[in-house]
Amino acid sequence: MIAINAQQALKSIRNGDLASIYVILGTVDYLADQLKQAFTQQIPSEEQTMNVGSYDMETTPVAVALDDAMSAPFFGERRLVFINHPYFLTGENKKTKVDHDLASLQHYFEQPEPSTILVFMAPYEKLDARKKLVKTLKKQATTVEVNQVSEAETQRYVQAALDEKQIRIDADALQELVNRTDGQLGLIMGQLPKLMIYAAQSQRIDLAAVQALVTKSLTQNVFDLVNDVLRYQTQSAVELYHELVAAQEAPLKINAILLGQFRLLLQVKIMARAGYSQGSLASTLKVHPYRVKLAMQTVRHFDQAALRAAYLGLLQTEVQMKTTQRDPELLFELFMVQFVNERQSAVGTRLSR
């Protein structure tokens, strides 16, 4: 099995160094799209209509894609065939009426068509390595992993895109851009065009530009809310909660993200004490490395009891939101009051001993 990263794959594809079968495996859509474009550009534009095929396995039998893959190129040197959502390579039991001839696919893996580039676009964390089909595929294919990208890698992609336009970005502006997009590469790259327009004259993106042009994600706003809760800043927390509701964010959704964030903080607190590193935490918890980094920075300042109390309080708030007619904003205010009171009571108990 040949396994390479996205940057290595892009370089070899653009240089025309192509294999017969590829698996693009992972959930980072931006990188998968970049690879798909690079493959397509290897077919001359005037030939693409006849020599590029794309098939969704959730709606189309794999035999149709194989017929295309086994056909000779039409007045060209290569044929390019994309097989999208090949769920039969995973452990997923998807209910579908599509009948797939996997025996023929197994045969194709063993004897691929030399003039065809067959690309499996697999937006999954992993394939089912127990399957014979997958074992054969791994032997024959070049696998390109496009799973979670580290913060450093994300910044390199951003820098490379800006270097092409001869635009520089200040360090604090780049960090704020990462913060406001939760470190998600696709979201960041989607924000770059308007920042580049802003910097057309000065050739520089500063902090003010990012703050003015890039809206904080809901997750980032909730992260600010988490910090307010843990610092017992009731007024600030309640005001931010009201702002999110006024911006048409559903209270149940806000509470669910809050719960998820406190669950992550508890997990990181416990596992970091057990010796897990940032990288191993992200891998074990299947969480974006940037979220783990922020969580590790946060839990240093708060004890496990406070994290647990907040989590349990929000869990109770969710139950009340689902089972009563009480105003969600009032329920959040009551949660904050109770959380602060419990903290003051705990501190008073310790001082009296």
Image: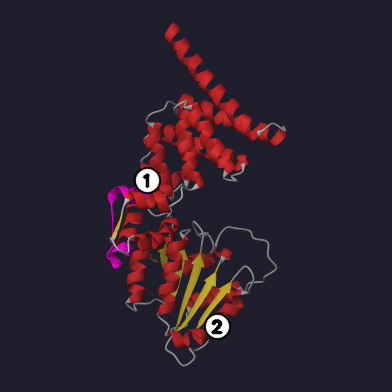
x and y percentages locating residue 297 in the rendered image = 37, 36
Quarter of the picture containing the C terminus is top left
Check the image and name the residue furthest to the bottom. Answer: 75
212 in relation to 345, above or below = below
Give 180 or 195, whichever is nearer the viewer: 195
Residue at figure coordinates x 55%, y 60% from the top left: 90
Residue 212 shows in the view: yes
Displayed quadrant of residue 12: bottom left
Q: Residues within 10 Å of mark 1 (few under 14, many from 20)?
A: few
> Is residue 22 rendered to the left or right of residue 54?
left
Residue at figure coordinates x 63%, y 58% from the top left: 93
Which three-letter amino acid code belongs to the residue tagged 1? Gly
For label 2, the residue is: 68
* Circle number at residue 225: none
Magenta segment = 161-178
x and y percentages locating residue 123 in the rendered image = 51, 61
Displayed quadrant of residue 282: top left
Label 1 – label 2 distance at C-alpha: 42 Å
Q: Main secondary structure of the magenta part?
A: helix
> Is residue 210 rendered to the left or right of residue 106?
left
For label 1, the residue is: 279
233 in relation to 83, above or below = above
Which three-letter amino acid code belongs to the residue tagged 2? Asp
